[in-house]
């Protein structure tokens, strides 16, 4: 029985005759398992007439043995990869631009106009589609460039394994891949880089607060001391004359002096707004003076604080409202070894208040600026008896007297015979000073110390009290108010979207141009598919070196050291010393992987 090899020729059988192959099939002489070969012989059946006709028709419709005639090897529809690359490139660009314009339309729009979750989901979907489109463009070009690279160099089979997996395995990027197929390796690197655009682009649209301002005219309370219907004082029961501040002023002063605050004022313009307001009111100004002559060593040993009212009352003449204060400047809760005393003189003035009020979430912040004018005089007898005829002066002086008489006047000293201090003043009820209790030989001692600089702290008491009266004022005025509203809006950063998309587009476009160039050079469309590998491995030499590894090439180390190139296979001469392998005697050639000496270069 004649053994058929890939290099022997035969006559084509008739459509309705049993072929020579089906009649005389015998095992390959190198088969290791004859029983397995016999099994395939036993199950071999001649083709049905209609099927045989089809096979013969296919063989005659192409070159002999179904191989391309390499002299004219342009494949059918070779331009399809170009069309697909154009399609994916245009689709990716269109979706990317749509993504940009959609986010741009949401920029600085309220978050309520479109669901934030849907904006994020649709943006992520668009980013995924753009990434996928440009990646597919690159992969289509990569498969053409990869097969083109196989024509140019002799490449080890082990490296071919890595080149075939460049798009799926990052560990395939080895130095030899860059050296033997630099263009294909670069395109594969592009494909791995593009997915970064899908990570950055969704973050280009975020939600944050936007503050908008609106100016309007609003009505604000003003200092009501000049109103004849307002009185900060109370009269002597069953008599004529001012007894002192009324209970409302006393309670208000006690509250704000102890906390060092200004009483909250209801906002006239919303929870977030601001306005400026100017009014005329009383104020204090304190200056440093020399220590008084009465401060002797004996007195200083136990004196902490002393305030003396220098205001005089004269029936015919006005007098200044002044207070002289001397205190030991202890800034810690301990007795100072040296007697460091400070003396100040506080005087009442008429002043202009430039008040700036800023509301944040309904909480006001007051920023007063005072311009001092003439000194505020004490009430004379006429004003004292009939304060209603002089409302502004009477009310302003009453506020000053509340600060002086109820909270500052008096003495704070330590008893000469005990360790206890005996304050005879209410300054300890203010935020200005404090006292602490220390254990000393089993006794509890109350010691004086200063919380704030009295030179500025005392004037702030009257300033805070004056501004706090606005909360109860029945007098009002109009001023310009600026209200702000905080709204959650979308913010779009086009750089985070357009830059990654532009880079991805450029990579895709360059890959497209390279792919088009390769296809124009070869005229062959390939692909990373099994049939492409099948038609390019029809080389008996490959059968020999792969023998024994039909299920896995994992242990075929010797085989992987061979260098192969894709080219026109050099076929051995037949019996007639020609390449005749078909019915009509035409030359039959085909491309396949082989050793350098086994193949000729393809164009």
Image (spheres, rainbow, N blue to C red):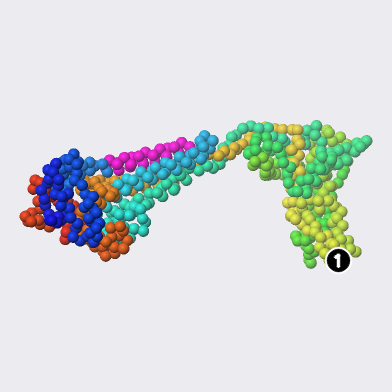
Residue visible at 78% across and 58% down in the picture: 449
Identify whether 556 is placed above or below 354: below
Q: Position of residue 104 (x, y in %)?
A: 45, 38
Instruction: Residue 543: give x, y in percent of width and height.
Output: 22, 58
For image coordinates 86% across by 64% down, the residue present is 443
In the picture as drawn, the residue positioned furthest to the right comes out as 238
Question: Is there any visible trace of residue 320 in the rendered image?
Answer: no
Percent x, y of residue 551: 30, 57
In magenta stretch: residue 156: no
Q: In this picture, which residue range is highlighted in magenta?
A: 82-107
Q: Position of residue 508 (x, y in %)?
A: 33, 46
Q: Is residue 539 visible?
A: yes
Q: Residue 399 appears in which quarter of the rendering?
A: top right
Residue 96 located within the stretch drawn in magenta: yes
Residue drawn 69% across and 34% down? 220
Farthest left residue in view: 576
Q: Quadrant of residue 163?
A: bottom left
Looking at the image, residue 479 sits to the left or right of residue 531; the answer is right
The residue tagged with tag 1: helix, strand or loop? loop
Q: Which residue is mark 1?
A: 442
Residue sitting at 59 percent across and 34 percent down?
214
Given residues 160 and 195, the one toward you in this image is 160
Image quarter in which the N terminus is found = bottom left
Q: Main secondary structure of the magenta part?
A: helix
């Amino acid at each position: 029985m004649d053994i058929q090899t890939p290099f022997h020729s035969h006559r084509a059988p008739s459509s309705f005759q049993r072929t020579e192959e089906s009649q005389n099939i015998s095992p390959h002489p190198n088969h290791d398992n004859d029983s397995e070969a016999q099994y395939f012989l036993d199950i071999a059946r001649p083709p049905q007439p209609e099927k045989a006709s089809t096979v013969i028709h296919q063989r005659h419709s192409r070159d002999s043995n179904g191989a391309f005639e390499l002299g004219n090897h342009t494949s059918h529809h070779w331009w399809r990869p170009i069309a697909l690359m154009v399609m994916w490139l245009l689709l990716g660009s269109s979706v990317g631009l749509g993504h940009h314009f959609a986010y741009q339309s949401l920029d600085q729009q309220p978050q309520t106009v479109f669901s934030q979750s849907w904006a994020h989901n649709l943006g992520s979907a668009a980013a995924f589609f753009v990434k996928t489109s440009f990646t597919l463009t690159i992969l289509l070009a990569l498969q053409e460039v990869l097969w083109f690279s196989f024509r140019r160099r002799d490449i080890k089979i082990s490296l071919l394994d890595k080149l075939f997996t460049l798009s799926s395995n990052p560990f395939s990027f080895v130095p030899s891949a860059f050296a033997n197929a630099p263009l294909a390796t670069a395109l594969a690197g592009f494909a791995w880089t593009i997915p970064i655009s899908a990570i950055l682009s969704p973050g280009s649209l975020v939600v944050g607060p936007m503050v908008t301002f609106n100016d309007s005219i609003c009505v604000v309370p003003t200092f009501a001391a000049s109103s004849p219907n307002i009185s900060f004082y109370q009269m002597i029961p069953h008599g004529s004359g001012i007894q002192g501040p009324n209970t409302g002023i006393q309670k208000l002063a006690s509250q704000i002096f102890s906390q060092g605050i200004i009483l909250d004022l209801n906002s006239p313009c919303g929870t977030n707004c601001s306005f400026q307001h100017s009014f005329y009111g009383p104020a204090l100004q304190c200056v440093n003076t020399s220590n008084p002559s009465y401060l002797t060593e004996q007195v200083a040993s136990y004196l902490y604080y002393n305030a003396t009212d220098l205001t005089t009352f004269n029936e015919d003449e006005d007098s200044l409202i002044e207070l002289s204060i001397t205190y030991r400047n202890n800034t810690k809760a301990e007795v100072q070894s040296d007697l460091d005393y400070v003396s100040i003189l506080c005087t009442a003035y008429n002043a202009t208040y430039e008040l700036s009020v800023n509301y944040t979430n309904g909480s006001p912040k007051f920023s007063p600026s005072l311009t001092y004018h003439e000194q505020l005089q004490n009430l004379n007898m006429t004003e004292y008896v009939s304060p209603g005829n002089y409302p502004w002066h009477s009310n302003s002086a009453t506020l000053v007297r509340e600060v002086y008489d109820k909270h500052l006047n008096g003495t704070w000293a330590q008893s000469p015979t005990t360790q206890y201090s005996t304050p005879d003043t209410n300054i300890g009820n203010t935020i200005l000073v404090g006292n602490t209790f220390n254990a000393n030989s089993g006794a509890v001692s109350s010691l004086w110390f200063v919380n704030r600089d009295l030179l500025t702290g005392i004037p702030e008491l009257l300033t805070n009290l004056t501004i706090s009266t606005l909360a109860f004022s029945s007098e009002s005025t109009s001023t310009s108010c600026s209200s702000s509203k905080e709204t959650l809006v979308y913010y779009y950063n086009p750089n985070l979207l357009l830059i990654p998309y532009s880079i991805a587009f450029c990579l895709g476009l360059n890959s497209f141009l390279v792919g088009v160039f390769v296809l124009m050079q070869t005229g062959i469309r390939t692909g990373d598919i099994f049939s492409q590998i099948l038609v390019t491995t029809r080389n008996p030499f490959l059968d020999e070196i792969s023998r024994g590894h039909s299920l896995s090439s994992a242990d075929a180390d010797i085989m992987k050291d061979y260098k192969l190139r894709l080219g026109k296979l050099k076929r051995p001469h037949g019996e007639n010393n020609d390449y005749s392998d078909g019915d009509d005697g035409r030359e039959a050639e085909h491309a396949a992987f082989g050793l350098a000496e086994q193949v000729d270069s393809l164009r």
